[in-house]
Image (cartoon, rainbow, N blue to C red):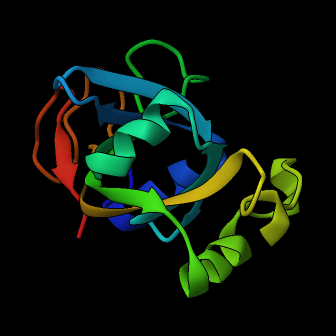
Amino acid sequence: MSTDLAGHARELLDANRYLVLGTVDPDGRPWTSPVYFAAAGHREFCWVSAADSRHSRNLADRPRVSIVVFDSSVPPYHGRAVYAVGDAGELTGDDLDCGLRMYPGPTARGATPVARQDVTGSSPYRLYRATASDVWVLCPRAPQQPCSLHGLARDHRTRVA
């Protein structure tokens, strides 16, 4: 199993199309939403959402987010996941131009390219970006075997530098 945790995180992000975005509403209630995403490295995530969706409205006043990207195709006890926390918000100006270059990612992922007019003005959609302050992976290991980094034979998260 790999000990390059940043590479492991990037591999998981490249192989998966959806992340689970966690936000909080004005009353402190958590809300999670699956969104198609594109990533730059393992700390920047972009997605398009309706500006009036619950998670978008939550972000307008409370930018803190949690993110999970996991491989749901693996058998039980073979878990592979990236976890992150950070801040997110709608992209505008030069940040929007940068986000549009990143989103929707490589054409092989199957998403339709997005133009500025698709996420500005009277369009109901906006482009958002989360920047992770902290990132972890489920430490890579074979089932019932210890990981090579910590010698633990159980699932555990490991911080990615």
Q: Residue at x 25, y 29 (%)?
A: 145
User: Relative to 78, is 139 above or below?
Assistant: below
Image location of residue 146, percent across then percent down:
19, 35
In this image, 31 relative to 115: left or right? left
Residue 42: x %, y % from top left = 43, 64
Whether residue 16 is visible here, answered yes or no, is no
Furthest-bottom residue in this view: 94
Camera-nearest residue between 148 and 74: 74
At 54% from the left and 29% from the top, the residue drawn is 34
**Residue ranking furthest to the top:** 76
Task: Tell whether 54 sits left or right of 155.
Answer: right
In screen coordinates, is 159 left or right of 54? left
Relative to 73, is 155 on the left or the right?
left
Considering only vertical position in the picture, is 23 above or below 115?
A: above
Task: Depth check: give the residue in front, 44 or 2.
Answer: 44
Would you identify the image quadrant in which residue 97 lies?
A: bottom right
State the residue lying farthest toward the front: 122
| 92, 131: nearer the viewer | 92
Does 22 appear above or below 147?
above
- Residue 29 image position (x, y, % from top left): 22, 20
